[in-house]
């Protein structure tokens, strides 16, 4: 179980970082979202993975650590608010700057003589 | 007053929330009055807190009555109460400046300003590392909205970079926290400091990964070298009161570095003792270098002050790298000085650029100022203070840092860099001063608005702090010395905060 879990978190993180490094604000936002999913799963695992263990004492034979669950809840709320903000900001930037590149201007490609201006495409 | 330690968090929260409610939210004049009263209250409560901490020692405040390490504790010690007093004083002065017209650029300036102060104060006061993350997010989300205040293409672009960078930073922060909680089993900083010494082998390596991830995050906030590229553009494009308030934001990062890498991963951390030092050394020195180059290349005052913030961050990081009581004490003094001086420079740059028409704050020949004498004096005093010339506080701060270097290798690296950085600042300030004040043509522009009385009062408060810091230099440095020895003494800063845990 641990191996599968770790693989999933790692895959999510890798995809998140790859997308966050791209140039368009949409893929960056998706990347940040994936990264925050990975973080939430990771935080959850910091209390160790256990089966048949309730977070309340006396409910089951062994008990699990309730603190990571509280941390994950906090992280989810904050991550959700931040994602909502960055989506609105990306839309505002698309309107203000005329394209959706994170730098505000599209880089000119080596084989591309016609500079694209975003908005007209 | 047992609840005094939470006032710096509660007051801005309360005032910010009240300002969002109908009778006040519709009228900007009510909001201004409420903001000034709020920051004044905060100034009084933090001054009382500092006095009390100085007289009676550390104030522990267990939120909800849950004792540490199980509950979240606010720790008002000498370091954090100095920082919250600095924040409140600065925000009071900035608020005086903002209420005379700079707050009209967008809605909700005042509530957001209050929420940001709440986040900053909370980050300084908290004794729990996850709570530190939460307060970081509070101050960040307020800063995102404040940064875009008054709108414009440049601001949108700078904000997009700033927000994305900090969101990635927050994710890394949580990764680091997860690793540390998984290995140490606690989030209370004092408890972590005690438990980290027992780690061995693989667990220690894992905890080291987490600790260094946190260094990346704090370095991003503090504008440490590879993570400083966002700063000049962000600070230069923000509106004046926001940029001035941001002067303390890099200090939140520096403060966290001192707190985490002196108390938790300090000398008593067993296998993980002083893990940040080998990284901090080169990065701090390179930060000073790159900041000084940026100072040289600045085209206008706003960019110049942003680059000076990077230089001061580098100097403070060098103090963290030296890792001794003297260096920490010097850093605390220099932190107070550089925060106030750079905030004043951001405000002054705004007044200047409003009087110069299209040239704004760039170093080009343009129309003369409407108030050349007033602005000239303010600029000269600030320049002297930021360059580090006697008799102002920059001089004392830099001397303290230089004196704190211990071995000859440290001296060989730190002295030339800090002195050359000062030389760079001296050259650029002389160039800026002559261009701005002496090389002008035409007459005063028709739209030039002279600085209002409250604006002058706000800037004067910030500037006057510099001679006062020298005048009461003995008391201040004695205080910072005590604060530094508290931070370096694990008995006081870790065991003292956890009743019932003995060494």
Image (spheres, coloured by chain):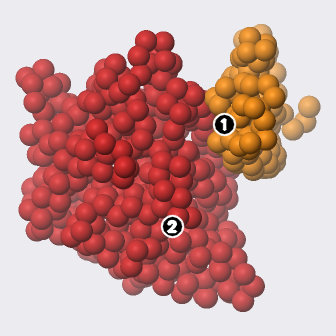
Chain colours: A orange, B red
Q: Nearer the viewer, residue B486 or A19?
A: B486
The residue depicted at 24 percent of the width and 37 percent of the height is B319
Q: Quadrant of the N terminus of chain A?
A: top right
How far apart are the alpha carbons under marks 1 and 2? 30 Å
Where's residue B241, x and y in %? 49, 65
Q: Is residue B198 above or below residue B436?
A: above
CB under 8 Å between discs 1 and 2: no
Q: Quadrant of the C terminus of chain A?
A: top right
Q: Nearer the viewer, residue B255 or B51?
A: B51
Where's residue B378, x and y in %? 27, 68
Give the letter of the chain under mark 2. B
Determine if residue B302 is in view. no
Q: Is residue B79 above or below residue B254?
A: below
Q: Quadrant of residue B275?
A: top left
Residue linked to disc 1: A65
Residue linked to disc 2: B9
Comparing labels 1 and 2, the label whose residue is closer to the camera: 1
| Marks 1 and 2 share the same chain | no
Q: Which mark is residue B168?
A: none
Disc 1 element = loop
The residue depicted at 40 percent of the width and 29 percent of the height is B196
Disc 2 element = helix
């Amino acid at each position: 179980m641990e191996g599968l879990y770790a693989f999933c978190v790692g895959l999510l993180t890798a995809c998140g970082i790859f997308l966050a490094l791209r140039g368009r604000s949409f893929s960056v936002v998706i990347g940040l979202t994936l990264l925050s999913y990975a973080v939430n799963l990771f935080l959850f695992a910091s209390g160790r993975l256990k089966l048949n263990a309730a977070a309340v004492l006396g409910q089951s034979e062994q008990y699990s650590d309730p603190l990571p669950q509280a941390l994950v809840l906090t992280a989810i709320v904050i991550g959700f608010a931040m994602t909502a903000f960055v989506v609105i900001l990306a839309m505002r930037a698309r309107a203000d700057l005329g394209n959706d590149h994170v730098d505000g201007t599209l880089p000119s490609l080596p084989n591309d003589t016609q500079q694209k201006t975003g908005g007209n495409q | 007053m047992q609840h005094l330690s939470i006032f710096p968090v509660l007051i801005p929260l309360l005032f910010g929330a009240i300002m969002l409610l109908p009778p006040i939210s519709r009228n900007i004049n009510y909001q201004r009055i409420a903001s000034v009263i709020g920051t004044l209250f905060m100034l009084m409560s933090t001054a009382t807190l500092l006095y009390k901490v100085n007289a009676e020692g550390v104030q522990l405040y267990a939120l909800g009555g849950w004792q540490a390490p199980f509950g979240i504790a606010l720790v008002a010690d000498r370091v954090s109460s100095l920082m919250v007093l600095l924040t409140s004083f600065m925000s009071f002065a900035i608020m005086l400046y903002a209420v005379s017209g700079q707050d009209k650029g967008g809605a909700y300036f005042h509530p957001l300003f209050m929420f940001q102060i709440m986040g900053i104060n909370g980050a300084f006061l908290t004794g729990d590392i996850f709570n530190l993350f939460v307060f970081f997010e509070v101050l960040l989300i307020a800063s995102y909205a404040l940064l875009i205040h008054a709108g414009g293409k440049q601001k949108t672009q700078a904000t997009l970079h700033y927000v994305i960078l900090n969101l990635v930073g927050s994710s890394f922060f949580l990764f680091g926290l997860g690793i540390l909680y998984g290995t140490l089993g606690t989030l209370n900083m004092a408890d972590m400091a005690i438990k980290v010494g027992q780690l061995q082998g693989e667990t220690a390596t894992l905890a080291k990964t987490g600790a260094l991830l946190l260094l990346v995050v704090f370095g991003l906030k503090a504008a440490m070298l590879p993570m400083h590229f966002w700063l000049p553009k962000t600070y230069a494009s923000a509106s004046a009161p926001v940029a001035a308030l941001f002067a303390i934001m890099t200090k939140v990062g520096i403060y966290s570095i001192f707190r985490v890498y002196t108390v938790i991963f300090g000398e008593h951390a067993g296998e993980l003792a002083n893990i940040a030092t080998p990284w901090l050394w080169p990065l701090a020195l390179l930060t000073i270098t790159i900041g000084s180059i940026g100072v040289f290349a600045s085209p206008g005052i706003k960019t110049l002050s942003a680059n000076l913030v990077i230089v001061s961050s580098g100097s403070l990081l060098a103090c963290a790298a030296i890792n001794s009581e003297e260096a920490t004490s010097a850093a605390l003094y220099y932190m107070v000085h550089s925060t106030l001086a750079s905030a004043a420079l951001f405000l002054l740059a705004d007044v200047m650029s409003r009087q110069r028409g299209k040239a704004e704050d760039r170093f080009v020949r343009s129309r003369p100022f409407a108030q050349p004498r007033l602005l000239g004096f303010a600029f000269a005093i600030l320049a002297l203070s930021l360059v580090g010339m006697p008799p102002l506080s920059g001089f004392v701060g830099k001397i303290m840092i230089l004196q704190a270097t211990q071995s000859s290798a440290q001296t060989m690296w730190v002295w030339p860099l800090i002195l050359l950085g000062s030389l760079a600042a001296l050259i650029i300030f002389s160039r800026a001063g002559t261009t701005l004040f002496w090389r002008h043509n035409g007459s005063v522009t028709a739209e030039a608005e002279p600085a209002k009385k409250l604006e002058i009062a706000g800037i004067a408060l910030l500037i006057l702090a510099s001679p006062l810091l020298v005048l009461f230099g003995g008391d201040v440095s004695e205080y910072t010395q005590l604060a530094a020895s508290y931070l370096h003494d694990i008995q006081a800063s870790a065991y003292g905060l956890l009743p019932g845990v003995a060494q």
